[in-house]
Image (cartoon, helix red, strand yellow):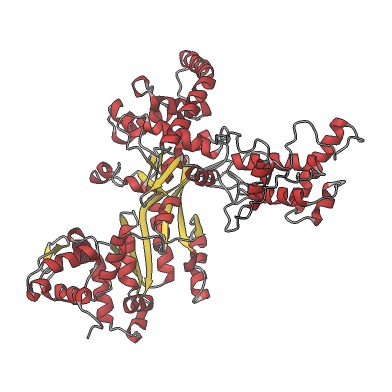
């Protein structure tokens, strides 16, 4: 046997030290700070660090770094500012090419690892693991969100929700944003100037770190085991830091109540913190200013004081934010499609008529309907800010779909007519209005007979339950919208409006409607418009309903009745397989009752649905 060759042992060639350790230290700090905040700019800083590690020559200032890849004007400006501060603190002759005390070595894994997920191999990360003497044995730093950041507020809010007796264990997006906002310095809905990210962007980091789990559609957010442990630590630290402040605020409020019994309607940060504390300890709960305001308004509107326990229970509903009388104005929202495209002169005439009538309106994109009304919160401009703060907007229960006779004819032919009515029923507003413009004798020159169009209008009112308003032209349409705006302004006068979530459909408002009063439990405009997106992700049940409604003669009520028995195509096909004969399959759906009159679906439609889903090959 040939002798085995001896193994040649050698020492790995040491990595050259970075000739610009000061810039490397500052970039590393910027990257770590962006990572804690969940900002995606951390990946840009990491790429700049990789480029700087590969550059073998010393740099005199940040402007020279522009020749390197991933060094833009923004990074160079930040480095120049830090360099000027460094010179002021250490003298103009201070060296920037010597490694300062505490600067991380360039071969360390935390400087060379690539943070962003990529399809390429992480060669730099492997090099860092081999080059660092104890990099493999160093414990990975635990992720802890910065105080009053988006991740911090979300974790605390979800934790406090789990501590409420009878809690459902999860929160929807809208209620989570509303509850967490006062714990965060940034807005969850409006990005800062010059940025496209909000505090909500940090939720993706929490999901990646396996601290928060997102399920269902609409999305439900809840804490994992690791997230619950971290949230408990954050809550205990928050409790320790704020106990002294709360005692001082409580004693000050007691002294104020003894001196002056007038209720202060201006909320503060301490009030919001007291709300969160009372959610954790409901037994020690004191009525808040918002509850007192709502209770006073209920007494004013109904003439009878409500039970305090009922008021307290109502106020604990998610998104239970009140708009008090006098703090909001009623405004008409016009879909931008109604002002652009098509006959420009005719559409601009509507805008001019509204302006001439003195209507307070706003043109924006509406995902369903052509007109609706919102209660917009009145906000005062803040000194030193270019724009006034964004006020809350709650959607009133009225929505208008406007149709000219020619548009109605086209929508019936291409199928939009039934789909639009179906979406109006599902949008969450309970008072849909169909505004039909007769257009004089123009209806006699359309593709469909005038009797067919008139029958469709009557069906919309009688069968679908819409309120139908007939007008002659654009001027009468503008006059009707003007009258409705003034009517709603008077109708909601002196009423307290409460924001509710669409996911919690049915909470509040029903008793008021039974008494003939307008519903004061309303959705926010952002939630309404997002929920009405036409091409959003749909469930199997929703897609199945849209498939059924493509069948001639199968309306939304009939499709809904079928879905009550067979919610998916799979369940319907399984039922067909269990039938013993062909005749039984054809009559499977015939006895299903639909609508208010509970009529049978009938054998003809049942046979059509059966052949559609069970016939192999093309239909004849």
Q: Measuring from the top left, give residue 371's x and y in whole percent.
A: 42, 61
Q: Is residue 466 visible?
A: yes
In this rendered view, identify the residue nearer to me: 533 or 17: 17
- Horizontal arrangement in the rendering, residue 386 relative to residue 365 (left or right): right
- Horizontal arrangement in the rendering, residue 269 relative to residue 212 (left or right): right
Looking at this view, name the residue that lies furthest to the front. Answer: 1
Q: Residue at x 50, y 45 (%)?
A: 208
In this rendered view, identify the residue nearer to me: 97 or 246: 97
Q: Measuring from the top left, give residue 258's x and y in whole percent.
A: 46, 13
Q: Quadrant of the N terminus?
A: bottom right
Looking at this view, name the residue that lies furthest to the right. Answer: 93
Q: Measuring from the top left, give residue 546's x and y in whole percent.
A: 30, 67
Q: Measuring from the top left, give residue 220's x and y in whole percent.
A: 38, 45
Give the vertical position of 51 relative to 22 (above or below).
Answer: below
In this rendered view, identify the residue nearer to me: 306 or 275: 275
Q: Quadrant of residue 35?
A: top right
Q: Is residue 305 visible?
A: no
In this rendered view, identify the residue nearer to me: 597 or 60: 60
Q: Residue at x 38, y 76 (%)?
A: 407
Q: Quadrant of the C terminus?
A: bottom left
Q: Quadrant of residue 512?
A: top left
Give the vertical position of 279 relative to 247 (above or below).
Answer: below
Q: Residue at x 52, y 33 (%)?
A: 183
Give the vertical position of 52 relative to 450 (above or below).
Answer: above
């Amino acid at each position: 046997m040939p002798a085995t060759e001896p193994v040649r042992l050698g020492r790995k060639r040491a990595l050259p030290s970075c000739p610009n350790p000061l810039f490397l230290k500052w970039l590393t700090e910027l990257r770590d700070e962006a990572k804690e905040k969940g900002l995606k700019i951390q990946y840009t800083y990491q790429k700049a660090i990789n480029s700087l590690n590969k550059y073998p020559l010393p740099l005199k200032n940040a402007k020279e770094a522009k020749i390197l890849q991933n060094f833009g004007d923004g990074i160079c400006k930040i480095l120049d500012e830090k360099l000027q501060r460094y010179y002021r603190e250490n003298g103009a002759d201070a060296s920037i090419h010597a490694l300062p005390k505490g600067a991380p070595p360039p071969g360390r894994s935390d400087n060379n690892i690539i943070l962003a997920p990529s399809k390429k191999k992480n060669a730099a990360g492997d090099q860092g693991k081999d080059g660092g003497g104890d990099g493999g044995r160093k414990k990975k730093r635990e992720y802890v969100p910065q105080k009053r950041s988006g991740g911090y507020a979300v974790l605390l809010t979800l934790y406090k929700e789990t501590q409420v007796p009878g809690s459902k264990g999860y929160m929807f997006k809208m209620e989570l944003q509303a509850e967490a906002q006062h714990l965060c310095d940034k807005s969850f809905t409006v990005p800062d100037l010059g940025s496209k990210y909000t505090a909500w962007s940090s939720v993706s980091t929490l999901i990646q770190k396996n601290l928060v789990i997102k399920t269902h559609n609409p999305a439900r957010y809840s804490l994992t085991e690791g997230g619950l442990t971290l949230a408990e630590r954050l809550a205990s630290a928050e409790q320790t830091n704020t106990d002294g402040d709360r005692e001082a605020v409580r004693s000050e409020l007691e002294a104020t109540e003894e001196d002056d019994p007038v209720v202060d309607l201006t909320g503060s940060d301490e009030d919001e913190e007291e709300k969160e504390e009372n959610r954790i300890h409901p037994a020690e709960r004191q009525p808040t200013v918002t509850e007192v305001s709502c209770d006073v308004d209920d007494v004013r509107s109904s003439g009878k004081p409500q039970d305090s326990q009922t008021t307290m229970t109502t106020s604990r509903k998610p998104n239970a934010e009140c708009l008090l009388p006098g703090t909001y104005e009623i405004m008409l929202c016009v879909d931008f499609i109604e002002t652009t495209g098509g006959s420009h002169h005719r559409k601009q005439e509507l805008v001019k008529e509204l302006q001439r009538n003195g209507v307070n309106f706003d043109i924006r994109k509406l995902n369903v309907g052509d007109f609706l009304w919102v209660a917009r919160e009145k906000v005062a401009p803040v000194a030193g800010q270019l724009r006034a703060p964004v006020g809350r907007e709650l959607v009133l229960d009225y929505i208008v779909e406007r149709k000219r006779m020619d548009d109605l004819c086209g929508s019936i032919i291409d199928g939009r007519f039934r789909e639009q009515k179906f979406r109006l029923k599902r949008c969450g507003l309970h008072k849909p209005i169909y505004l039909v413009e007769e257009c004089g004798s123009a209806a006699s020159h359309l593709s469909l007979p005038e009797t067919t169009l008139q029958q469709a209008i009557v069906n919309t009112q009688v069968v679908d339950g819409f309120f139908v308003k007939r007008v002659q032209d654009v001027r009468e349409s503008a006059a009707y919208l003007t009258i409705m705006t003034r009517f709603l302004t008077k109708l909601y006068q002196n009423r307290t409006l409460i924001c509710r979530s669409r996911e919690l459909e049915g909470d509040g408002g029903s008793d008021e409607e039974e008494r003939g009063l307008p519903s004061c439990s309303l959705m926010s405009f952002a939630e309404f418009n997002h929920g009405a997106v036409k091409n959003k992700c749909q469930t199997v049940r929703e897609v199945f309903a849209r498939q059924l409604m493509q069948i001639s003669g199968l309306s939304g009520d009939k499709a809904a009745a079928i879905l009550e028995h067979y919610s998916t195509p799979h369940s319907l096909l399984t039922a067909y397989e269990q039938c013993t004969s062909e005749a039984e399959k054809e009559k499977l759906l015939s006895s299903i009752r639909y609508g208010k009159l509970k009529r049978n679906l009938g054998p003809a439609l049942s046979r059509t649905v059966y052949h559609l889903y069970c016939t192999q090959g093309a239909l004849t």
